[in-house]
Image (cartoon, rainbow, N blue to C red):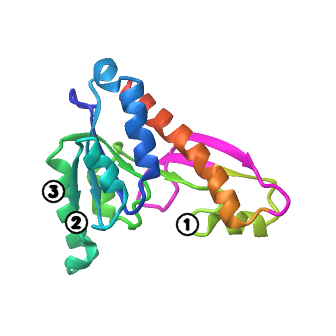
């Protein structure tokens, strides 16, 4: 970790996991305890509601529209340039709905983490809640993991388990899992910055 312990968070939407991390950073005094702060929140969507939350807390924000770039590689290069302005110790994906190029992942190797709404290695990819219900699983959950070039396969840093109840829909299960995401993601980030 760098001495500054800057954290950059990438979002595409509401940013509820980002908000949970920002609130944990404030309530648990990461700046005084670890010299850590959320230095920037970056989105690929100008209408991402999480940007409003970040701006209200005087966190630097930026928008990079992936549609304005000719290729995935061009977008990731621009994104890396924006992230690197903040010299991050940690880059946190919080509902960032882009598959990142191998070059991007390699650039942040060891500093890039994500949260996935399943108990990995079960159900990588999309539609995790419906897939868990359809498979007859009794439990679901979420996993914080390091990002590698292989989708949803990096080292697991934290997990939480929730029951799948009779009559659950994917939406109901998603809400139950999200409440646990908001607990384990800040906890995993804090463990990393405290090293």
Of residue 108 and residue 15, the one placed in the foreground of this image is: 15
What x and y, as percent, mark residue 87? 18, 41
Looking at the rendered structure, the number of numbered marks drawn on it comes to: 3
Residue under the image location 28 percent in, 41 percent down: 57
Residue 149: in sight, yes or no?
Answer: yes
Q: Is residue 192 visible?
A: no
Please identify, in this view, whether the residue under mark 2 or under mark 1 is nearer the observer: 2
User: Secondary structure beneath disc 2?
Assistant: loop
**Residue at the disc numbered 2:** 64
Which span is picked out in magenta? 142-167
Question: x and y percent of residue 116 in the render?
Answer: 54, 55
Q: Residue at x 37, y 38 (%)?
A: 22
Query: For residue 152: magenta?
Result: yes
Q: Residues within 10 Å of mark 2 (few under 14, many from 20)?
A: some
Residue 88 in magenta?
no
Q: Which residue is mark 1?
A: 125
First reached walking from the N terminus: tag 2 or tag 1: 2
Mark 1 closeness class: few <14, some 14–19, many ≥20 residues within 10 Å = few
- Mark 3 = which residue? 81
Neighbor class of circle 3 (other Cα within 10 Å; few <14, some 14-19, many 20+) is few
Query: x and y percent of residue 160 in the render?
Result: 64, 42
Q: Position of residue 104 (x, y in %)?
A: 28, 59
């Amino acid at each position: 970790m760098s001495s500054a312990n800057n954290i950059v968070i990438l979002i595409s939407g509401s940013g509820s996991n980002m908000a949970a991390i920002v609130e944990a950073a404030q309530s648990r005094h990461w700046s005084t305890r670890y010299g850590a702060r959320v230095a920037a929140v970056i989105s690929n969507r100008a209408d991402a509601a999480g940007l409003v939350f970040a701006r209200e807390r005087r966190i630097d924000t930026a928008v990079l529209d992936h549609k304005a770039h000719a290729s995935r590689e061009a977008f990731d290069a621009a994104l890396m340039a924006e992230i690197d302005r903040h010299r991050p110790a940690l880059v946190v994906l919080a509902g960032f709905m882009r598959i990142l190029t191998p070059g991007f992942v390699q650039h942040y190797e060891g500093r890039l983490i994500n949260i996935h709404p399943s108990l990995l290695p079960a159900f990588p990819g999309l539609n995790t809640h419906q897939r868990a219900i359809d498979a007859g699983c009794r439990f679901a959950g979420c996993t914080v993991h390091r990002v590698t070039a292989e989708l949803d396969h990096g080292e697991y840093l934290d997990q939480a388990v929730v029951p799948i109840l009779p009559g659950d829909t994917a939406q109901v299960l998603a809400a139950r899992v999200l409440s646990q995401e908001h607990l384990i993601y800040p906890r995993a980030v804090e463990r990393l910055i405290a090293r």
